[in-house]
Amino acid sequence: MFECFHNFEFFRQTTSLKILFLTHSFNSLAQRLYVELMRCGHDISIEFDINDSVTQQAAELFQPDLIIAPFLKRAIPEVVWRIFTCFVVHPGIIGDRGPSALDWAIMKGHQEWGVTVLQANAEMDAGDIWAAEKFPMRFTTKSSLYRREVVEAATAAVLTAVRRFQSGIFKPISLDYSRSDILGRVHVPMRQFDRSIDWQRDSTLAILTKIHAADGFPGVLDTLFGQSYYLFDACSERYLTDKPGTIVAKRNNAICRATVDGAVWIGHLKPKNDTGPALKLAATTVLQDYLTDIPEVSYDPFYMPFDDTYRDIWFEQQGSVSYLYFEFYNGAMDSRQCKRLRDAYLKATESDVRVIVLMGGADFWSNGIHLNHIENAISPADESWRNINAMNDLVHAIITTDHQLTIAALQGNAGAGGVFLSLAADYVFARESVILNPHYKNMGNLYGSEYWTYLLPRRVNESQVKSIMQNRFPISALEARASGLIDDCFAVNREDFKKKIRCVAEAIATDPGFPELLTKKQCQRRVDERTKALQEYRNEELNQMQLNFYGFDPSYHVARYHFVYKIPHGWTPRYLAKHRALKSAKLI
């Protein structure tokens, strides 16, 4: 029905559009669309979907040529879609209607799914179709599918739809279920009853499917030790088993629960709390009082012959190159994870490899300190201090590596301290579609550490340093390369990216000039240390962070609380809502 376009530069038109984003939050899809449409030369302002009157006011203020809704939880008001053309991004194939689109696709085992861009009208998800893209389904979590396949398909579909809108001649196709090629159907919201697990009957595959289909939100409601919890972050276990439903092992953040034909690891839980909000936390943290007699089954990250188990840090070595993976849930790194990663990294530096590649995780490279675990601590200020120091210890270990060259290979997005963790490496490469948020200001004007005051000026000039740290907007990998923030970006596909990274790493490791490269690095580190010691950078940063954590201004603690409990926005931040800033300027 629709042709596919994958070269985004093809969409660039001579006439730019004023586009208003109407979205529940500035999530990964909204950020990706923002950077791509800005790169196409469009003028974009953003409004959070708070209520009908706010939406109407935003449209009247900005007077957009087009409204795009990347991520909504309710319908666009009629008073808006009757006046303005509104594109709704729906994570389903043509004809799919209703919420829980990805949830049902996973539960029903669809081999192919897609994204549809449709025009808002009086019926939910039933408007005229402007573009659509399909993708093959992986057996993975809903969150991972969304961040990878859905975001890529949605980006291609939206850019196609915008190009067609600009043409002024394209006629969108009405939804007609009598057509044989309309495979999607109307479905109802998925309930916890549909997701419920019968531990005495359900296979490992069935249990994983149910938890995968609820990952991110809302989780699968289940019972452990007589209490109700939502389950998240599951993977299979090859060897451990016991009586179905019993917890047979624990490992770092996860618990292992037996099934009728094996076992599953569950990494995160959220207590069901009828009196107020609850936090999603590591399973071993939530259940720590019940796990005293449960054996800790450790593993060696340097020797893991199979991947059918829970692991968050592991190595692969090929010749003189070592690849370090750290797959932390949502990219957050708590104090213990930072320490374990540092220990693993230091062990790698003791080997005879020439190059260490920091691969991070597939969905996130790193997003810095673990705000949920900090919020859950007896003293969030003290845990913030422990966490940032653990991050600093890790960054310090990478910066001071003197017998290997290091590469940060960003498969997934990175934010806040995670960006500066990557800059500790000698080379930084990213997938072309990666989004970076190298700033801390959205978290209550947090100053930030991770030696950013040393690492950032090594790559960009003084004015760029100020711009990067003050700017709260996402940066594309292409922008980061152009500014010098990263060395290069290539490949949208992850497998292609990993193949390229292997080629780059092997080329560096086998380069006849490797000894000279290593000597140059060692000399530069000595010069930098004489000019200003790393400890001075750290002390200066931590003096500012200490004020954030323990000072009179509670902004960081308030912002963290709102973030981890997902408190709905009462208004759109002015840096996003350009149209409201314009209104204020006119009033002045």
Image (cartoon, grey):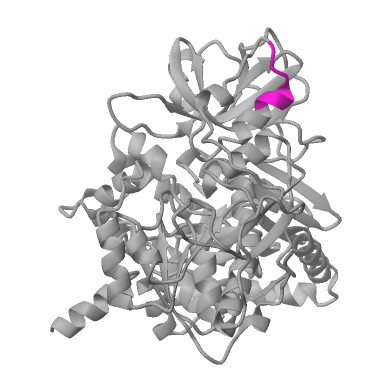
**Image position of 374 (left or right of 302):** left
Q: Which residue is outermost to the bottom?
A: 14
Please tell me whether residue 100 is drawn above or below residue 290 in the rendered image. below
Q: Which residue is outermost to the left?
A: 588
Horizontal and vertical percent position of residue 392: 46, 54
Magenta residues span: 201-207
In depth, the one of 361 and 153 nearer the eye is 153
**Location of residue 542 (image quadrant):** bottom left
Identify which residue is drawn at 41% across, 84% down.
Answer: 462
In depth, the one of 232 and 194 nearer the eye is 194
**Image position of 159 (left or right of 51):** right
In depth, the one of 17 and 539 nearer the eye is 17
**Image position of 87 (left or right of 406):** left
Quadrant containing the N terminus is bottom right
Instruction: Residue 441: tell me if it is visible.
Output: no
Instruction: Residue 235: tell me if it is visible.
Output: yes
Horizontal and vertical percent position of residue 194: 57, 25
Identify which residue is drawn at 25% across, 60% down.
Answer: 53
Horizontal and vertical percent position of residue 516: 75, 77
The mark tally for this picture is 0
Q: Which residue is outermost to the top?
A: 243
**Location of residue 301 (image quadrant):** top right
- Magenta includes 188? no
Horizontal and vertical percent position of residue 336: 50, 38
Please tell me whether residue 192 is drawn above or below residue 563 in the rendered image. above
Identify which residue is drawn at 85% across, 69% down.
Answer: 510
Quadrant containing the C terminus is bottom left
**Image position of 184 (left or right of 37):** right
Please tell me whether residue 299 is drawn above or below residue 480 in the rendered image. above
